[in-house]
Image (cartoon, rainbow, N blue to C red):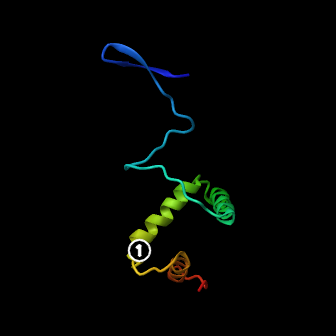
Amino acid sequence: MPRRVKKRGAIQKAKVGRGRPPVHQETWSKVSVVLFDRQILHLDRLVTDIRGKSGKILNRAEIIRALIDGLLDSGMDVTTIASEADLHARVARRLGSPFR
C-alpha cells in the first residue's frame, strides 16, 4: 500500500519499493551482466557455506562487489589484459590457483 507523503501542503502518494531497501554507503547504479550457470551455482553454494560457517548473510551482489573491489584495490596492472581468459589466468595466479 503506498505511503502518503506531505509535500508543500498537499498530500501525494509515494511509491513503496518492492523487497528490502538497499543499504549502500555510496552512490550506485543497477546493472545487468551475464553470468554462466556454473558461476551462479558456485555463488549460491558460497553464500550457503558462508552462512553455515559464520552465520553471516551475504548475497551474490555483495560477493561480486567485494571481488571487484579486491581486484581494484590489489594494484594489479590489468591494462595489458588481452581477453577474459587472460584476466582469469592472471587473477587465479595472483590468488595462488593452479589455473594457467
Observer-nearest residue: 67 or 57?
A: 67
Q: In the image, what residue occupies the spot 46% across and 44% down?
A: 23
Return the x and y of residue 80 as percentages of the image width and height.
Answer: 41, 81
Look at label 1 and name its amino acid: Ser
Along the horizontal axis of the image, is 67 left or right of 37?
Answer: left
Observer-nearest residue: 42 or 50?
A: 42
Residue, far left = 8
Observer-nearest residue: 23 or 29?
A: 29
Rendered view: 16 above or below 40: above
Number of marks in the image? 1
- Give the residue pinned by disc 1: 74
Q: In terms of image quadrants, where is residue 73?
A: bottom left
Along the horizontal axis of the image, is 29 left or right of 93?
Answer: left
Return the x and y of residue 50 as percentages of the image width and height.
Answer: 62, 60
Q: In the image, what residue occupies the spot 55% across and 77% down?
A: 88
Give the structural element (helix, strand or loop) at label 1. Answer: loop
Rendered view: 8 above or below 61: above
Where does the C terminus fall, quadrant-wise? bottom right
Observer-nearest residue: 39 or 45?
A: 39
Q: In the image, what residue occupies the spot 54% across and 60% down?
A: 63
Q: In terms of image quadrants, where is residue 89?
A: bottom right
Q: In the image, what residue occupies the spot 67% across and 64% down?
A: 42
Q: In terms of image quadrants, where is residue 85?
A: bottom right
